[in-house]
Image (cartoon, rainbow, N blue to C red):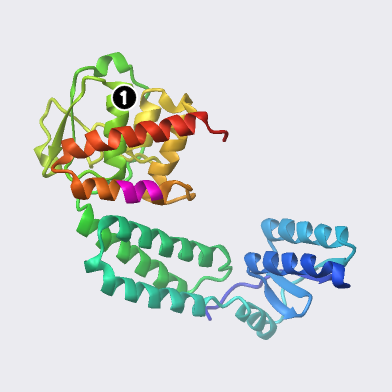
Amino acid sequence: MDEHPPVRWLVLTASLTGRAASTARVRLWRALKDLGVGNLRDGVSLLPATAQTRAAFDTLAREVEAEGGTAWLLELPAQAPPVDDALIDLFDRSADCAELLRTLTRLGVELPSWDEATARRELRQVEKALAGIQRVDFFPGVATERARAAVSALATEINRRFSPAEPSPGIGKVQRLDVAAFQARRWATRRHLWVDRVASAWLIRRFIDPKARFLWLDTPADCPADALGFDFDGATFSHLGDKVTFGVLLASFGLDADAGLLRLGQLVHYLDAGGLPVAEAAGFEAMLAGLRDTASDDDSLLAAAIPLLDALHRTYSGARA
């Protein structure tokens, strides 16, 4: 593995005895596995010392004691280099990275047969797997970087195939705008609508400009000077910071006080850019893919998607957070 500076360590010893403690032992094992601990021996777990790992071990120690067990949390200073190297080896994630790379190789072969919904779903799965590795990769090295680069390459290929003009995140703050100045306008975005664009068009029609007229562009360069572009580089409204276009529109027109729209925005963000999973995302994506397959053009697709988005907004507005 790569060379590392000296490491301070935390050691948690935990013991739960008796048949009644079997469920608690399973919970403890799962919690330790989720933390990515190194196992020195049964009941003795190791993590590099940070504020986060100490808090996690403290919590587990209290839970063990609440179940009638015993737990000790010890801090070790940096050890002699050979010992430190051996301890660091307990956190080697190269096998996990190799498995992810094998998955990515297979997905690269299958990609030409996918539709966009399948491609985005598979990409989210490998991004989630990579995030899981990185979360517990306390000593990242070449293997993790290769896995990260391979996931990035798959994302680039999917965007090249399905969204060649996908916007890059801009830098700056969202400016609050007066909706009255954006009425009966022409709005333009890239043709062959997908999640962020169709949801943004719905938001414009329903909450911003009820008389909006839409242009579907072959390329962003075709956008007329008098049209309000959205969801492409250089557009009036596009990705900004950690917000996708739908989120930028919400913030720009003060619509982010609407709980239903905020939850819909989480779904759009997850499907367009990743992040926290949303339960309804897979179903919405599948329905949108079906609508796009049967729609004759983007006007028909938007018309078909509007009732679906209306229903989601009503559900989200009435559901408890």
Indicate the position of residue 111 as horizontal and vertical percent values: 26, 67
Taking the image as drawn, is residue 281 in sight? yes
110 vs 227, left or right, is: right
Q: Position of residue 320 (x, y in %)?
A: 57, 33
Above-or-below relation of 164 to 224: below
Identify residue for label 1.
206
Q: Callout 1: helix, strand or loop?
A: helix
Q: Nearer the viewer, residue 279 or 79?
A: 279
* Residue 285 within the magenta-colored segment of the rendering: yes
- On screen, residue 244 above or below 44: above
Residue extending furthest bottom? 82
Which residue appears at 49% of the width and 49% of the height?
276
Please provide the residue range marked out in magenta.
283-287
Residue visible at 53% across and 33% down in the picture: 319
The answer to whether residue 173 is visible is no
Residue closer to the observer: 312 or 155? 312
- Seen as rendered, the residue at the extreme top is 180
Kindly indicate the quadrant of the structure image that contains residue 118.
bottom left
Among the 4 quarters of the image, the one containing residue 125: bottom left
Residue 173, located in which quarter of the rendered image? top left
How would you classify the magenta stretch by its main secondary structure? helix
The image position of residue 96, as x and y in percent, is 50, 76
Between 150 and 285, the one nearer to me in the picture: 285
For the C terminus, give its image quadrant.
top right
Residue 170 located left or right of residue 32: left
**Is 111 displayed left or right of 98 in the figure?**
left
Q: Give the mark count.
A: 1
Q: Three-letter amino acid code at disc 1?
A: Arg
Circle 1 packing at 10 Å, graded few (<14), some (14-19), many (20+), is some
Q: Residue at x 22, y 43 (%)?
A: 193
